[in-house]
Image (cartoon, rainbow, N blue to C red):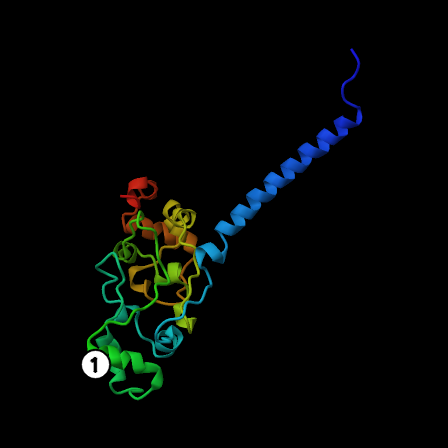
Amino acid sequence: MSQIFHPSMNFIVRITLLAVVFILAGVGWLGYYIVNSPYVTDVGVVKAQPVPYSHKQHVGGLGLDCRYCHTAVEESNTASLPPTSTCMGCHAQVAKDSKVLELVRASAQNNTPLEWIRVHNVPDYVYFNHSVHVHQGIGCETCHGRVDQMPVVTKVQTLQMSWCLDCHRDPAKYIRPRNAVFTMGWQPPTDQAVLGPQLVAQYGIHPKQLTDCSVCHR
């Protein structure tokens, strides 16, 4: 039987298969890059707020505690946003005529809430409780970054499932004493490799239970 294909087809097939492999690898890499890019995660993306509130000035400069504005963070699944009355507690006297605060004053006068733009959000199918994490020694900056250095708050973590699981599988790497949860720039007094496991045991945390699907998906 005579040969149907020219011998050069062997080379062409090898090159074609190699090209297909590279294309598939490229598509896979592109998909991974897009999923983890700021376009999808919003990490580092600045969102304009109705009032240019600076955490750097209020937290870093004036030393306000997170709980001064986020009053429900120790008791609720949400951290809560401050009502306008909280802002006016200071700004009825401080910078009371500033043009920047016109919307704040109007909100107080008209008894209508300011419509802040959410920066950190999780899907509806994810259950997250701030109070649980606070009482288990997870610091604000672990998830939200050094907000005391941010003129405008942006996301510093993806909040994706893989990121959450990294902590749930090994909380000892991130845990801190409860009295340091709201401290920005906290450093462990001893090596975290020593302190972490001690606090995990002290707070009764069981990492194997934290990776159960029902913990976050209810």
Q: Amino acid at mark 1?
A: Gln
The x, y position of residue 173, in whole percent, is: 41, 52
- 91 with respect to 163 (left or right): left
Q: Position of residue 89 (x, y in %)?
A: 23, 80
Task: Measuring from the top left, give residue 9's x and y in whole percent.
Answer: 76, 27
Residue 146 versus residue 111: which sits nearer the camera?
A: 111
Nearest to the observer: residue 195 or residue 133: 133
Residue shown at 79% from the left, 23% from the top? 6
Q: Is residue 199 left or right of residue 4?
A: left
- Eyeballing the image, is 146 above or below 208? below
Q: Looking at the figure, which quarter contains the C terminus? A: top left
* Residue at (34% x, 79% y) in the render: 62
Q: At x 46% / y 64%, what residue is drawn?
A: 45
Q: Residue at x 49, y 52 (%)?
A: 36
The correct choice, above or below, for 16 with respect to 89 in the image is above
How many marks the image carries: the answer is 1
Q: For residue 213, what is the image quadrant? A: top left
Q: Quadrant of the N terminus?
A: top right
> Looking at the picture, how far across and down is residue 31, in whole percent?
53, 46
Q: Could you say whether the residue bearing mark 1 is in a helix, strand or loop?
A: helix
Indicate the quadrant where residue 155 lies. bottom left
Q: Return the residue found at the far top.
A: 1
Residue 75 relative to residue 181: left or right: left
Mark 1 = which residue?
Answer: 109
Sort mark 1 into few (<14), some (14-19) or many (20+) by Cα contacts within 10 Å. Answer: few
